[in-house]
Image (tube, rainbow, N blue to C red):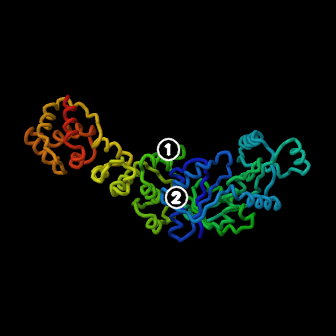
């Protein structure tokens, strides 16, 4: 059993890509299958080495490892041989229409109430007409002649599916400049690399019908392939997420401080009725089941991801995050703030609160109370019991309690109306900073 993840190095991976990569990796772990990473870099204009490096970095960051890897750009001889085979069988034919001519044909068919399917006019081209077109400076691109059949398969996610090939235009497999399109190269690679299971997005369903027909034309047995198409992601309102995916790149989420284990746990259960639980990849793989993925679009909710990220951070040890904390941050600091972070990047702010300078708000009407708070400030050394003893003394002296007692102190000491427990923050802030902030808030 062999699966593959085949990204194009034309941009950064986003959560949609990551979901497909994770599905392949977890499926491979559960079934002890080989996991291949194929870099689909035949788009020479848009492919960039830096994107390929970023893709590999993102996958490793998620904890995903692959057994084999190759680039399509190194396999052009395979595609040349396969294309020649299709030409020899009469399944790959040259075309000379311009985009303008094709657009005119589509418009005419639509006006007549017909589907905008390519009319195969170039199949009637005589050798003399082709020679004349080339003599006039035209270079052909090549279409694949689809079978007059319905291609069917049983999808591991979507169930029984089929594509009526007569209702689909013959796909272009080779551009006029001689470069190959994904529709073709993917089939050649899947055959040559002995891929058995293709797990990808639902937007490829029509491609699957086409590609199975190409595989048959190349002499492969279509039944050797098993497909699973994951329904596409939508936002919380049900709108397609595609327009927002660039803002949900793994690179951006990593920079924001989202933990890879939170992303993995969330995407592994997205679209199922199972609640996401952070756990090692091996454990996730043992329970991963494509048949539990719903056939309806999966709702990606960034709030759910952040809630899961908060749980991951709350469980994280100081050693696990030490290198990403401010240089002087201590275990005591991490233990104090980790339960109040949605993102690890927020730790920077709380480090400034305990070790730097904050601009506490001026608390009108609280001058007398803040003066009492300063007067009752205990002597050091301070520990987690200091907050309780200090506020008990203030309660007895001022008669305040509850929010009226605690909120002015929190605002004066942190500049925030919520956050980590002050019992743990106060010893980290220290007596000198506490006194200074009380004075500034009373001005």
User: Which label was assigned to residue 247?
Assistant: 1
Question: Which residue of the protein is positioned furthest toward the left in this rendering?
Answer: 396
Q: Position of residue 129 (x, y in %)?
A: 89, 47
Going by the image, does 286 lie left or right of 369?
A: right
User: Which label was assigned to residue 255?
Assistant: none
Callout 2: 10 Å neighbours few (<14), some, many (20+)? Answer: some
Residue 339 in view, yes or no: no
Check the picture and name the quadrant holding the C terminus.
top left
Quadrant assignment, res 83: bottom right
Circle 2 — which element?
Answer: loop
Q: Report the residue at 55% width, 53% height from top.
A: 55
Q: Nearer the viewer, mark 2 or mark 1?
A: 1
Q: Position of residue 206 (x, y in %)?
A: 65, 55
Q: Report the residue at 77% width, 58% height from top.
A: 80
Whole-Å distance between the Cαs marked 2 and 1?
Answer: 26 Å
Compared to residue 322, the image places residue 32 above or below, namely below
Q: Position of residue 136 (x, y in %)?
A: 87, 41
Q: Report the residue at 43% width, 48% height from top.
A: 302
Q: Earlier in the sequence, mark 2 or mark 1?
A: 1
Compared to residue 237, the image places residue 210 above or below, namely below
Callout 1: 10 Å neighbours few (<14), some, many (20+)? Answer: few
Instruction: Name the residue nearer the viewer: 403 or 95.
Output: 403
Query: Which residue position is annotated with label 2?
Result: 295
Going by the image, does 218 lie left or right of 331?
A: right
């Amino acid at each position: 059993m062999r699966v593959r993840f085949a990204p194009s190095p034309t941009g950064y991976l986003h959560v949609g890509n990551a979901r497909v990569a994770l599905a392949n990796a977890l499926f491979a772990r559960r079934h002890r299958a080989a996991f291949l990473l194929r870099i689909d870099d035949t788009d020479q204009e848009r492919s960039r080495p830096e994107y390929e490096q970023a893709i590999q970095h993102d996958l490793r960051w998620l904890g995903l490892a692959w057994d084999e890897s190759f680039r399509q750009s190194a396999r052009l001889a395979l595609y040349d041989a396969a294309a020649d085979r299709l030409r020899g069988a009469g399944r790959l034919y040259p075309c000379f229409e311009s985009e303008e001519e094709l657009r005119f044909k589509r418009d005419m068919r639509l006006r007549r109430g017909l589907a905008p399917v390519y009319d195969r006019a170039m199949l009637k081209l005589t050798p003399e007409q082709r020679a004349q077109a080339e003599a006039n400076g035209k270079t052909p691109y090549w279409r694949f002649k689809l079978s007059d059949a319905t291609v069917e398969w049983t999808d591991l996610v979507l169930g029984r599916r089929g594509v009526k090939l007569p209702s689909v235009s013959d796909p272009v497999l080779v551009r006029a400049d001689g470069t190959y399109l994904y529709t073709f190269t993917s089939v050649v690679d899947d055959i040559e690399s002995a891929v058995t299971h293709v797990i990808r997005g639902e937007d490829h369903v029509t491609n699957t019908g086409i590609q199975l027909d190409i595989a048959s034309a190349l002499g492969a047995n279509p039944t050797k392939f098993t497909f699973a198409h994951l329904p596409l992601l939508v936002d919380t309102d049900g709108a397609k997420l595609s327009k927002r995916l660039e803002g949900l790149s793994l690179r951006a989420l990593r920079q924001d401080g989202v933990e890879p284990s939170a992303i993995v746990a969330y995407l592994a259960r997205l679209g199922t009725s199972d609640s996401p639980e952070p756990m090692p990849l091996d454990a996730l793989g043992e329970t991963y089941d494509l048949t539990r993925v719903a056939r309806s679009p999966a709702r990606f909710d960034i709030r759910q991801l952040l809630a899961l990220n908060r749980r991951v951070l709350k469980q994280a040890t100081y050693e696990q995050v030490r290198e990403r904390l401010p240089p002087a941050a201590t275990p005591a600091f991490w233990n104090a703030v980790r339960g109040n972070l949605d993102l690890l990047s927020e730790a920077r702010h709380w480090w400034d609160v305990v070790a730097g300078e904050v601009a506490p708000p001026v608390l009108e009407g609280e001058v007398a109370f803040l003066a009492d708070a300063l007067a009752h400030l205990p002597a050091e050394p301070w520990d987690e019991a200091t907050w309780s003893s200090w506020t008990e003394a203030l309660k007895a002296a001022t008669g305040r309690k509850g929010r009226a007692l605690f909120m002015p102190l929190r605002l004066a000491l942190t500049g925030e109306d919520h956050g980590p427990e002050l019992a743990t923050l106060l010893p980290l802030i220290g007596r000198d900073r506490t006194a200074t902030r009380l004075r500034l808030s009373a001005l």
